[in-house]
Image: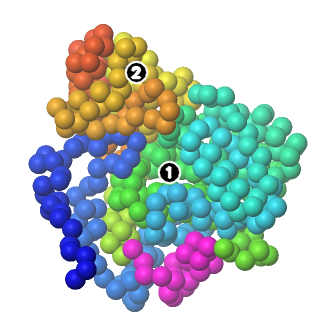
Amino acid sequence: MRYPPPSVVPLDRILPDEPLLMMGAGPVPIPAKVAQANSIVINHLGETMNRVIEQVKAMARYVFQTQSGQILGVAGPASAAMEMAVCNLVEPGTKVLAVCNGYFSRRLAEMAERCQADVVILDIANGEPARPDEIEAAIRLHRPTLLTIVQGETSNTVWNRYLPEICAIARAHDCLMVVDAVCTLSTMRLDMDEWGVDALITGGQKGLSSIPGVSLLAFSEIAWKRIEGRNAPMAQWCLDARLADRFWNKNSYHYTAPVSGIMAIHEALRLICAETLPARFHRHELCSLALQRGIEAMGLELLVKEEARLNSVVGIKVPDGVSGDDVRRHMSQIHRVEISGAFGLDILRIGQMGEQCHAHTIFRTLHAFGSSLKAHGAKLDLPAGVAELERILTEGQVV
């Protein structure tokens, strides 16, 4: 042989002996039943897979709060679902209004530009939600046929809290709504049909507490008619929604489906349905509030003001003179807890999505966070933070 095999070490010598508690902005820990489902491989075609797919779609309709007949899965990250939504609804010259709060909302704009859309970017002030009046003014000025927006901007923890009102404005102007709900779906309310969302995107690895690499999206009836009537051919083959429809809705072949990932997302959705959305929303709201108040009681400052603050990802300003990277490294090495930095911002991000969102994970994370900050020179009151966290969780009786 011309080339010898490389020298590698087995995974068990790379991975830590004790798994890290993943409390960053994703991926999140997965329940045991999801992990077990992810080990199953079956034929990607045939009656068994058809039954699984039908249940995935039924459960996804509940989680999306829609009666849409066009629920599709994507063998790829949430960004692939974003691209499927955008590239199927955009043709060369399509006027798109891209509402940009940060890194991921700007990614939607870039995807539209790559599809040769005529993209107008509406930049929102740092830390602020997009407001209905500025959206309506931009729609009246530019006359877009498509608007892209995130419900929650994971990169800087901003919540677009006026999304229902923005959707109503867009519908009144015959403008389709593409909404990224990657970090928010199942952690906070989102009613696709009631609000008038035309393309709704999520990934498996955040609120759903499934594995990375399998994502879901739904198209409204209006959006699907737009896709079926498009003039320009699709440049992408794997992301062609009409081809994906063959597998997801017509029991036919598109490409070899990510069987194990579909099994995992089936179980993740089943656990959400068993918990129910109202109970899940309450759990996330209470746990996040407790975490936020605990952080503030320690003497730290959150990045975003309360009215625009996500309950799925919390952003904390790094104290002066402290290295966020050092804090994260200390948390990981000493406390076996991992949180996230950010995209160019001097903040640390703690996730509160799905399996992250329980009393025992929050207590462990807050203690590790405060201890690591103190170890690197921050002045704070860790006991006060833990006491405030406990007070709010006890009053709310979260588990």
Tag 1: residue type?
Val
Residue depicted at x 61% and y 28%: 126
Residues 292 and 188: in front is: 292
Residue depicted at x 31% and y 40%: 23
Residue depicted at x 38% and y 58%: 212
* Colouring: rainbow
Q: Which residue is mark 1?
A: 182
Q: Which span is picked out in magenta?
A: 236-258
Question: Can you give x and y, in whole percent of width and height, for residue 80 in the image?
Answer: 53, 62
Q: Is residue 187 left or right of residue 189?
A: left
Q: Is residue 186 above or below residue 357?
A: below
First in sequence: mark 2 vs mark 1: 1
* Magenta stretch holds residue 244: yes
Q: Is residue 338 above or below residue 322?
A: below
Q: Which residue is mark 2?
A: 318
Residues 395 and 79: in front is: 79
Residues 291 and 351: in front is: 351
Q: Is residue 321 left or right of residue 174?
A: left
Contact check, label 2 and label 1, Cβ < 8 Å: no
Q: Quadrant of the C terminus?
A: top left
